[in-house]
Image: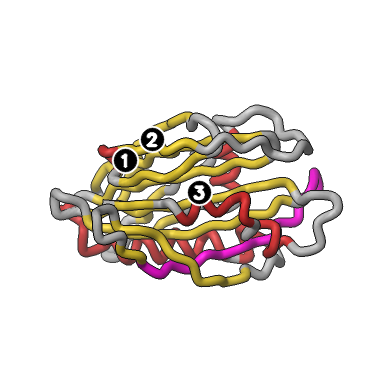
Amino acid sequence: MEPGLFSVASSATPVVRCRFSRASIALVCTLSLALTACSPKLDWRTVQLERLGYSTLFPAKPKQAERKLSYAGMELIQTLDLAQVDDAMLSVTTIEVPSEIQSQAGVLLKQLQENMLSPASIGDAKPHLEKSSYHIAGTARIKVEVDDYSIEIKNAGGDRWMRVRWIMRPDQSGGSRIYQQTLLISAPLKATSFKDELHAEQWDPFFDEFRVQ
């Protein structure tokens, strides 16, 4: 099975089997060049993806990859939009859940979160939870609270720091979309706090300007 994909066991309640932390990092890396240790040069621009129901600011033009996933007897479309600037990778992964299995969307979301944050995926790292928000598109500028997780991933080739959140929203066809918004950086040599670095002001446009339909 290719990195970043998940398979489903045949049971009454589908079970997602995925290596959704290090494996999803591998999926992200298939669209990126070799990482360097330079300070990022951020050139923010609005990227609006009507088909996927979201817009946000990316620090560079994102690349896109799409895969089909088997879940609960259905084929789900997973789309990855990723921008890399020096050693920083910012991505939005969208999973489209059709109306036929909408009742299982919450189960799928929970399994994705548990797999990503499990010791099997991130080792001994202790995720740090912090409240944040995203926007509902429209003139009212509605903000919705969301949980952001900051994670320090120990790696023989160099530590990686990751900030990740999940958002689920209904679509216009009776199904839903599950978004995973991720920032992945190499640990800076002189940084003292991975939480402060991941929540630094320079990354705010990517998270604070995330808007969904």
Q: Nearer the viewer, mark 1 or mark 3?
A: 3
Residue drawn at (63%, 65%), measured in percent from left and top?
119
Q: Position of residue 188 (x, y in %)?
A: 79, 49
Residue 75 location in percent, x, y? 27, 42
Q: Is residue 146 left or right of residue 53?
A: right
Does the residue at mark 1 contact the one at mark 2 (Cβ under 8 Å)?
Answer: yes
Element assignment for label 2 = strand
User: Residue drawn at (77%, 36%), measured in percent from left and top?
Assistant: 38
First in residue order: circle 2 vs circle 3 = 2
Q: Which residue is mark 2?
A: 67
Q: N-terminal of the two: label 1 or label 3?
A: 1
Q: Nearer the viewer, mark 2 or mark 3?
A: 3
Residue type of the residue flagged with mark 2: Arg
Q: Which residue is mark 3?
A: 206
Q: Is residue 202 left or right of residue 69?
A: right
Q: Which residue is mark 1?
A: 77
Which residues, given as a range, are shown in magenta? 144-158
What secondary structure prevails in the magenta region?
A: strand
**One can see residue 5 in this view:** no
Amino acid carrying label 1: it is Ile
Which residue type does callout 3 highlight? Phe
Residue 93 falls within the magenta-colored stretch: no
Name the residue nearer the viewer: 113 or 198: 198
